[in-house]
Image (cartoon, rainbow, N blue to C red):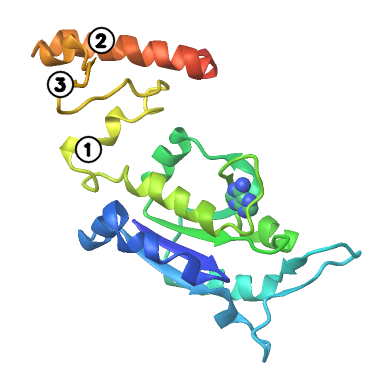
Amino acid sequence: MRIDIITVVPDLLKSPFEASIMQRSIEKGLVEVHFHNLRDYSSNNYKQVDDYQFGGGAGMVLMIEPIDKCISQLKSERNYDDVVYMTPDGETLNQGMANSISLQKNIIILCGHYKGVDQRVRDQFITKEISIGDYVLSGGELGALILCDAIIRLIPGVLGNETSALTDSFQDNLLAPPIYTRPAQYKDWDVPEILLSGHTAKIEAWREEKAFEHTNNRRPDLLDD
Ligand code: ADE
């Protein structure tokens, strides 16, 4: 998968791709991530990419021209499955969306900044608008990182068997059951006996029951779907 991220603050984005699972996915050649600094597409001597909004009002707006130039350049080089815009009024990211985006070959992610982008960008270029939750961030960059993390770990080969994404919370609309590791006894807090029993089928049934219980307690809305 190739991900092109368009931003006015590329420095905010780089380090998460230089550690852990996202780094390994790149090293294994399963993912390519390219950063595009919007200022490099400004035709203005001051590298200006934003301006005041028509009609008045607080906050600067990212202009259409540099975004058009950047997206058009990328699209002239390859086909993209989606051009995603990170915005608090987008569709809220969930595991189902992450699953479907992880199957794509090439995507562009545009990060808003300041007040957002000129509406014509959204009308002309954007195919998917994604929010990471009902709160407003200073820009789309942190949201883009969350989206990248959520999709990259689902790409076949990125996680080994031992960390398979198939057992994650939300993957089957259930929260994950409790997990334990050594020691089996710590102070007087014991690991549930069943997990030490070696009975694979019984352990699986226990996990399913606990996942259901936990989901019912914490996120009953997931069971309605
Ligand atoms: N940009 C600002 N706030 C955001 C949010 N909640 N989700 C995605 N992008 C954003």
> Tag 1's secondary structure?
helix
Type of the residue with mark 2: Trp
Placement of the N terminus among the 4 image quadrants = bottom left
Residue 134 percent location from the top left of the image: 64, 40
Residue 193 percent location from the top left of the image: 17, 10
**Does residue 222 sit above or below 111 in this rendering?**
above
Residue placed most toward the observer, 197 or 65: 197
Q: What label sits on residue 206 in the rendered view?
A: 2
**Does residue 191 sit above or below 78 in this rendering?**
above
Type of the residue with mark 1: Thr
Q: Is residue 204 left or right of residue 6?
A: left
Q: What label sits on residue 184 in the rendered view?
A: 3
Marks 2 and 3 in Cβ contact (< 8 Å): no
What whole-number distance in Å separates the C-alpha atoms at marks 2 and 3?
A: 17 Å
- Residue in the image at 15% along x and 21% along y: 184
> Of the residues under marks 1 and 2, which one precedes in the sequence?
1
Q: Is residue 79 left or right of residue 137?
A: left
Residue 104 percent location from the top left of the image: 39, 49
Quarter residue 166 falls in: top left
> Tag 2's secondary structure?
helix
> Of the residues under marks 2 and 3, which one precedes in the sequence?
3
Task: Kindly give the residue lying farthest to the front in the view shown.
Answer: 187
- Residue in the image at 10% along x and 11% along y: 197
Residue placed most toward the observer, 42 or 201: 201
Q: In this figure, which residue is indicated by the disc labeled 1?
A: 163
Residue 174, visible in the rendered structure: yes
